[in-house]
Image (cartoon, rainbow, N blue to C red):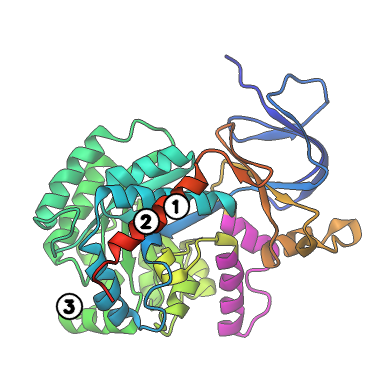
């Protein structure tokens, strides 16, 4: 059957180059758009006079099910936060908790205009199911560590073997794919990192990890291996797949940036998490882009961010880069919006009548800056021609039930933990 688009009348649309258009628009199932003549067959014929249509946001580093830990350990540094809060609770994780937590976070993503999440956590099959049920796009990366986890109680070899089977079978869904996610160089020994990389190459999957998040991690790596984290991973041929995604990258030398560029790796800037956990440094966006690294934005999980609203993350990314480099021109609204939506095939509409979008300015030239830095309600979300949210109400998930189930689950999850 031929695809049937959706029409928005009397609306505004910001395209991939951040050019503002006004008029009647058709949003096509393949992700393209065109001007409407008004006489086409359409699924819906919508009044768009109170809406601004844009590409959706893309979140390249999440731990979606960690919404279970949101609001805990608020005054703890990274190591204590992990040892006293995260690791003890994660010993009680179950597949059902991961699926519920993933859906809860997907509801938040949809409500804030994001239609893609690159996720790494435990129980990847349930993670993938949560993404599929929500209707958004995603990467479900199964986390590997050298210590036993609730997902892989027998350790890394079990994780590698089970992920091999999962990757072989796939998700049977075009929007969601599996990935291999060795947690970090300080939680995975050399053998585990090599096996994870080989598994990724075998299945041509994404390879996800944390890298150079703290000075301690960098110093320990140099002390143990006589080289820095990216150099160490490169020495293991970790990047051979050309599909690696490295979160944080806050403490890199220029030659490490060149290694990432050479291997077409994605480096994910997560400023809120870095600042909230007091790690003392964030990625240098100008240096990374100068080296040719493919930089993306990510929120990290709700436990270390409290929010997975990528627009909030984008604003903070711009501010911290301007602050750190004494340069108010870095990540201006156009560059910031392109970074936030890079690779998006989907559409979101925002409430143009939201007071936070006013004034629109002469020739409405303030719309993009207001959208990036001020905020506005997300009204509609479209993925593959399917409407996941309409008029500010998410339709692909039962948000009220998920909220109630989450409260009940968290009470059990934290029982016996201070």
The residue drawn where x is 18% and y is 42% is 164
- Secondary-structure class at tag 2: helix
In the image, residue 71 above or below residue 79: above
Residue 264 in sight here:
no
For disc 3, the marked residue is 225
Q: Is residue 116 left or right of residue 69?
A: right
The quarter of the picture where residue 177 lies is top left
The main secondary structure of the magenta stretch is helix
- Magenta stretch holds residue 335: yes
Rate crowding at label 1 as few (under 14), some (14 to 19) or many (20 or more) other CA atoms within 10 Å: few
Tell me which label, 3 or 2, sits earlier in the chain.
Answer: 3
The residue drawn where x is 52% and y is 38% is 396
For disc 2, the marked residue is 408
Rate crowding at label 2 as few (under 14), some (14 to 19) or many (20 or more) other CA atoms within 10 Å: few
Residue 313 in sight here:
yes
**Marks 3 and 1, Cα distance to the nearest angstrom?**
48 Å
Q: Which residues are magenta?
A: 312-340
Percent from the top left, x then y, of residue 54? Answer: 68, 48
Percent from the top left, x then y, of residue 83? Answer: 24, 77
- Secondary-structure class at tag 3: helix
């Amino acid at each position: 059957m031929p695809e049937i688009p959706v029409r928005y009348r009397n609306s505004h649309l910001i395209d991939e180059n951040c050019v503002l258009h006004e008029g009647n628009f058709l949003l096509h199932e393949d992700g393209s758009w065109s001007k409407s003549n008004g006489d086409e067959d359409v699924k819906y014929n919508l009044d768009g006079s109170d809406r601004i249509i844009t590409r959706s946001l893309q979140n390249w580093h999440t731990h979606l099910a960690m919404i279970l830990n949101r609001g805990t350990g608020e005054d703890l540094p990274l190591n204590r936060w992990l040892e006293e809060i995260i690791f003890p609770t994660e010993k009680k994780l179950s597949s059902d908790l991961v699926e519920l937590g993933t859906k809860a976070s997907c509801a938040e993503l949809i409500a804030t205009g994001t239609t893609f999440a690159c996720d790494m956590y435990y129980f990847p099959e349930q993670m993938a199911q949560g993404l599929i049920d929500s209707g958004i796009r995603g990467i479900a990366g199964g986390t590997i560590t050298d210590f036993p986890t609730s997902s892989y109680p027998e350790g890394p070899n079990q994780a590698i073997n089970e992920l091999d089977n999962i990757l072989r079978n796939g998700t049977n869904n075009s929007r969601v794919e599996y990935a291999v996610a060795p947690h970090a160089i300080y939680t995975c020994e050399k053998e585990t990192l090599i096996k994870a990389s080989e598994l990724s190459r075998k299945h041509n999957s994404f390879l996800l990890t944390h890298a150079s998040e703290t000075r301690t991690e960098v110093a320990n790596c140099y002390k143990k291996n006589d080289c820095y984290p990216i150099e160490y991973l490169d020495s293991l041929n970790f990047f051979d797949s050309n599909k690696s995604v490295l979160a944080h990258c806050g403490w890199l030398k220029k030659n490490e940036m060149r290694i990432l560029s050479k291997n077409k790796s994605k480096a994910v800037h997560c400023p809120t998490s870095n600042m909230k956990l007091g790690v003392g440094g964030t990625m240098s966006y100008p240096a990374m882009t100068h080296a040719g690294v493919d930089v993306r934005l990510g929120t990290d999980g709700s436990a270390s961010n409290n929010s997975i609203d990528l627009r909030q993350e984008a604003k903070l990314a711009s501010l911290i880069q301007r602050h750190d480099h004494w340069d108010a021109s870095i990540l201006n609204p156009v560059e910031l919006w392109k970074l936030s939506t890079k690779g998006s095939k989907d559409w979101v509409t925002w409430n143009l009548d939201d007071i936070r979008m006013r004034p629109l300015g002469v020739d409405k030239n303030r719309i993009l800056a207001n959208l990036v830095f001020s905020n506005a309600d997300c009204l509609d979300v479209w993925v593959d021609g399917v409407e996941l949210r309409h008029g500010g109400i998410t339709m692909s998930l039962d948000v009220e039930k998920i909220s109630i189930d989450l409260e009940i689950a968290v009470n059990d999850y934290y029982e016996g933990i201070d």
